[in-house]
Image (cartoon, helix red, strand yellow):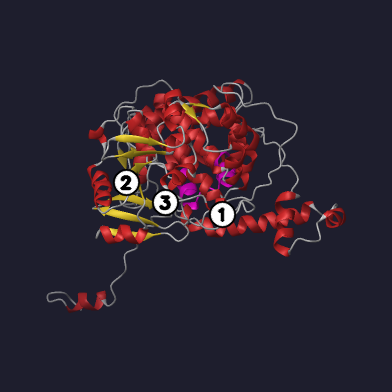
Amino acid sequence: MPSLDRAAIDPDADRVVRKLTRAGHKAYLVGGCVRDLLVAKTPKDFDVATSATPNEIKATFRNCRIIGRRFRLAHVFFGAKIIETSTFRANPRDEDDHDLLIRRDNVFGTETEDARRRDFTINGLFYDVEREEVIDHVGGLADLDSKLVRTIGDPDIRFQEDPVRILRAIKFAARLDFGFEPGTWNALLRWRGEISKCAPPRLLEEIHRLMRGSAARRSFELLVETGVLAVLSPYLAGLLEGEGAPATPPPIAGVVPRSTIAQIEYDEDDPAEHDPDDPDDDDEADEADEADDAADAAGDEADDDAAGDEADDDAADEEPDDLDDEEQAWHRVWADEPAARPAAAAPVRLSFVPPGGELVRRRRLAWEILPWIDKAVADGRDPSNVVAFGALLAPFLEELRGGELNGAVQELAHPLIVQLHVTRRDSERLRYLLVAQRKLLAATKRGTQAELSGGREVIDDAVLLFELMERAAGKEPGAAPVITPEEGRDDDDDSDPNHPRKRRRRRRGGRRRRRELPGLAP
């Protein structure tokens, strides 16, 4: 039995498990918290899996609220802390092997079924706090010992079911410094193109986790080594891949496999897909998921109509007559879909960067900044999403000023913003941070104060990005430049459109009141 530090278990999570057990239910710690405890890492969150239904959990805890529609689970509150408690689930596809699309996820099951429906073996472990033993139904202990990331079940099916699992596999391998089981690795390479079918907000959220999860450097090396970065953003791949990069993308295969498995997009997050060591985000993605899914579906229809103009007659002849309308639509979208073209990095030419050696030098600097992001996370500074994106782009901006700088920021940042669907709030703040670096650099060289507009949060982000740039360049940053608000603005003012300047309302009748004051001439 592997050793596990019981002192590291959250006392409230321990209390939830024991109380459910005393009430006659099975209950275990589950998932990422067990994995982290076994590899001597400190979990940031603790999840519980139980045989109790959501209503039974609520009846056991007064401080409980049931959430979710497709995946109903219970949140047990201890102040600001939440212990997420889910009922054992079975894979709903097991009810009908002919339907691969998960339409609902409230099929309750046994603990074994619950473990087998999870994504990777290292996330399918349970811990019984009463008996102080790890329960392993999926071979996760062996993979932890071998330091391998392996899917539960057929990796070809698992990655096609939900291609976001490809990014999660990269995340776990980077954070834990694990390798890939050969079948999982080959399937990841084979189906990486399927990532482009996922909703952009889900992809953007996973990219944030890769950048801010304390393993940014290794995460981006794996994104390049697997060719996934070119699928996510050919432009960003063009910036980071090539001479000066520490990783090399795989050769492009001539034939890309065609998926015949319906794409899965959950209306709500699946707790089995959560990772406790993900940083907390001001995540706007959840609000946009439904709209993006609808847009994706509409886009797929439009693409199919456009691509099929030349072959409509042949396809109509080959379509089986015994299929109903829904099945025929499925065949048009999936079974008859042409193979996707292999993704590759787009050639990047920046008008403000001389070609050749200068671009290589700046690319190398961009890679050098990634370990400093990890260091900031380890120090508890938790860079924001905008700082992380700024760290990838800022090294390509040097010795620019005025209108030339503003044009260069637009040229550099806009393709990334478009391809990764960065939110408007973050994209505007990203441009602000990139421009602010020039002011901070000039103030540091002159030993003067830097004039920056914006609230304290955005100014702190600008200073942190400047410090990361200095360290990546091999400089030891001194004291942070003194920040003074730009003329005509308060420190609380914010040029960021998400924090608009507050206007003072003129009090009506003010002049009349002034005339009525004693001692003043009318």
Alpha-carbon span between mark 1 and mark 2: 54 Å
Residue identifier under label 1 = 95
Is any atom of residue 401 visible in this view? no
Disc 1 vs disc 2: which is toward the camera? 1
For label 1, the SS is helix
State the image quarter where residue 184 is shown: top right
Residue closest to the eye, 220 or 501: 220
Badge 3: residue crowd in 10 Å (few <14, some 14–19, many ≥20): some
Q: Amino acid at mark 3?
A: Asp
Residue identifier under label 3 = 496
Apparent side of residue 455 relative to residue 411 in the rendered image (left or right): left
Residue closest to the eye, 479 or 126: 126
State the image quarter where residue 415 is shown: top right
Residue closest to the eye, 94 or 439: 94
For label 3, the SS is loop
Q: Which mark is residue 45?
A: none
Residue identifier under label 2 = 456
Alpha-carbon span between mark 3 and mark 2: 11 Å
Residue 105 horizontal/vertical position (percent): 49, 55
Q: Residues at badges 1 and 2 in contact (C-beta under 8 Å)? A: no
Alpha-carbon span between mark 3 and mark 1: 51 Å
Q: Residues at badges 3 and 1 in contact (C-beta under 8 Å)? A: no
Magenta range is 410-431
Residue 237 horizontal/vertical position (percent): 60, 33
For label 2, the SS is helix
Badge 1: residue crowd in 10 Å (few <14, some 14–19, many ≥20): few
Is residue 183 in the magenta section? no
For the N terminus, which image quadrant? top left
Q: Earlier in the sequence, mark 3 or mark 2?
A: 2
